Amino acid sequence: MKCPYCGSEETDVLETRDGEESTRRRRECQKCTKRFTTYERVENVDLVILKKDGRREKFDREKLRRGIVKATEKRPISTELIGSIVAEIEQELRNRDGVEVSSKTIGNLVLKKLKKIDKVAYVRFASVYLDFGDLADFEKVIEKLT
């Protein structure tokens, strides 16, 4: 690992911490003695999402997170919990055979997770994902929840 300060390739690892998504290493340069942090993450094969209209799109973890954040806005759900939901869903998708996944599969996984943690967030996400057309669609989903 090259030191970002002096470019030396002689560094020592002082500390290693494994996270859910990456490994964090605290390093010290032997030449200039400055410290810096690096993150290692396993590079996975890109997942391809099959959209309803037939288009194919590269899986975007951030897009999934934004959708869940929007559904859980102003709800008592921590960013850590949202992060773990995103990580769980991505892991489930990667554990499947093949690299192509339908957007419907992803939406159903999100609904399943939200249903367990927050009913309001579930209805919010369902209203967009299931494309509610009128109030009757909301009533049907709420009836199923109660």
Image (spheres, rainbow, N blue to C red):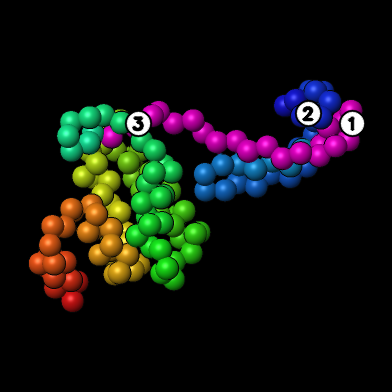
How far is mark 1 from mark 2, CA to CA? 9 Å
122 falls in the magenta region: no
Contact, CB < 8 Å: mark 1 with mark 2?
yes
User: Can you say whether 58 is above or below 70 in the image?
Assistant: above
Residue at 78 percent of width and 28 percent of height = 3
User: Can you say whether 21 is above or below 43 in the image?
Assistant: below
Q: Position of residue 122 (x, y in %)?
A: 28, 63
Marked residue nearer the N-terminal end (2 or 3): 2
Q: Of the numbered discs in the image, which one, if any, rests on residue 80?
A: none
Residue 40: quarter of image:
top right
- Crowd tier of the residue under label 2, counting other residues whose Cα lies within 10 Å: few below 14, some 14–19, many 20 or above: many
Residue topped by disc 1? 32
Look at the numbered disc 2 and give the secondary structure of its residue.
loop
Nearest the viewer among 134 and 141 is 134
How far is mark 2 from mark 3, CA to CA? 33 Å
Give the amino acid type for the residue marked by disc 2 in the picture: Cys
- Crowd tier of the residue under label 3, counting other residues whose Cα lies within 10 Å: few below 14, some 14–19, many 20 or above: few
Residue at 84 percent of width and 26 percent of height = 6
Q: Of the numbered discs in the image, which one, if any, rests on residue 58?
A: 3
Nearest the viewer among 11 and 123 is 123
Look at the numbered disc 3 and give the secondary structure of its residue.
strand
Q: Position of residue 46 (x, y in %)?
A: 38, 29
Residue topped by disc 2? 3
Look at the numbered disc 1 and give the secondary structure of its residue.
loop
- Quarter of the rendering occupied by the C terminus: bottom left
Residue at 13 percent of width and 70 percent of height = 139
Q: Position of residue 44 (x, y in %)?
A: 44, 31
- Quarter of the rendering occupied by the N terminus: top right
Marked residue nearer the N-terminal end (3 or 1): 1
- For the magenta stretch, what is the residue range? 28-49
